[in-house]
Image: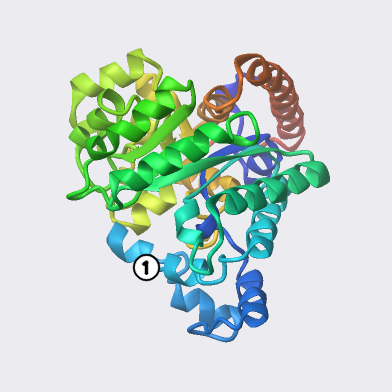
Amino acid sequence: MPLSDLVVTDELLAALPKTDLHCHLDGSLRLKTILELAEAQGVRLPAKDEAGLARAIHMGENVGSLEEFLKAFDITLSVMQTEEALYRTAYELCADAAAENCRLLEVRYSPVLHQKRGLKLTAIVEAVLEGLRAGERETGIRAGALVCSIRNMSPDVSLRLAELSVAYKNKGVLGFDLAGAEQDFPAKNHKEAFQLILDNNVNCTAHAGEAYGPASIAQAIHFCGAHRIGHAVRLREDGDLLNYVNDHRIPLECCPTSNVQTGAVADMSSHPLKFYLDFGCRVTINTDNRLITDTTVTKELVTVARALKLNAVDIRNLLIHGFKSAFLPFHDRAELLRRVTKEMDETFAKFAKQERKTGLTAV
């Protein structure tokens, strides 16, 4: 049976090995954990139970803009100001990702957002890395961190965070990121930080083309040297830049459900992921924020497979792109890719055999 004829079921998508390369720690806590941390720390929340807290952060809701979407982080960050909380949330995120068969997780966060109780930047980084290591030991997932700067912060802050990324290179920090609102906060303002990152051969990515046009993506690539682009839903508006990104195999960190919720795209059926994939771009699929977006990688795959009519070949390509795009040394990445490709093909073969027995047909 040709792979393109295999029925893409929810069970198949759950069984396949995955990556999550664009996942924010402060957007991916468990509701129960937020409540427990708040009680232990004496933090007042806008709700006292999980249902009320979900409503307060507009969990899984379409809020219409990135600025509205980001307001929920005030709640999650209020309980992430101790080493214990950072360790726990990083560990639990590994466990949650591994539970849905993610083999590789890149966790991004901005250490400067966790200093309200006086923690040093180094203590913050080390607490998160220790949590990720514990998660790796317990679940077998491969996990690392990306240090984020924020567009609306001073370039001096970005430089400090770049220095931090360089210091923890090869110690669990896999790269550097620029996040936050794009409008009025161009990436080129943070060029000095990115130059330090590039001078020290550190991986880097940037949120771009989410709430602003292709010019934002061009800045991230040409001014900042970004090796991957987060979201990039507006890349399709500039064919010349699209070809450049494709020619240079610059991976796109797509987060479809999040893009609908922030209003970056009107609805899932109009998301450019399938267009990028058909065009040949290195498209990856990610959660962005597991809690606030109310998603997992598996749920993202189910959603796009239905809305964009992806077949099993498309799914395989998406997942392979994730492993190819990881911020890992080449030989580590190649070895991981060999293992998961073999497992992936065995999984497809298993489901194809079951399909022949049951007489299912592709729709």
| Drawn side of residue 89 relative to residue 200, left or right | right
Q: Position of residue 262 (x, y in %)?
A: 33, 57
User: Is residue 117 shown above or below 328?
Assistant: below
| Drawn side of residue 192 relative to residue 252, left or right | left
Q: Position of residue 288 (x, y in %)?
A: 47, 49
- Quadrant housing the N terminus: top right
For the image shown, how many numbered marks are present on the structure?
Answer: 1
Q: Position of residue 259 (x, y in %)?
A: 36, 50
**Residue at 68% over, 19% down:** 332
Image quadrant where residue 307 sits: top left
- The amino acid at mark 1 is Lys
**Residue 174 in view (yes/no):** no
**Residue at 71% over, 17% down:** 335
In the displayed orientation, state which residue is furthest to the right: 138
| Drawn side of residue 265 relative to residue 72, left or right | left
Viewer-closest of 27 and 311:
27
**Residue 353 in view (yes/no):** yes
Viewer-closest of 130 and 351:
130
Categorize mark 1 by other alpha carbons within 10 Å: few (<14), some (14-19), many (20+): few
**Residue at 36% over, 47% down:** 157
Q: Position of residue 359 (x, y in %)?
A: 69, 35
Residue wearing tag 1: 71
Image quadrant where residue 220 sits: top left
Viewer-closest of 202 and 297:
202
> What SS does tag 1 mark?
loop
User: Is residue 231 shown above or below 238?
Assistant: below
| Drawn side of residue 136 relative to residue 64, left or right | right
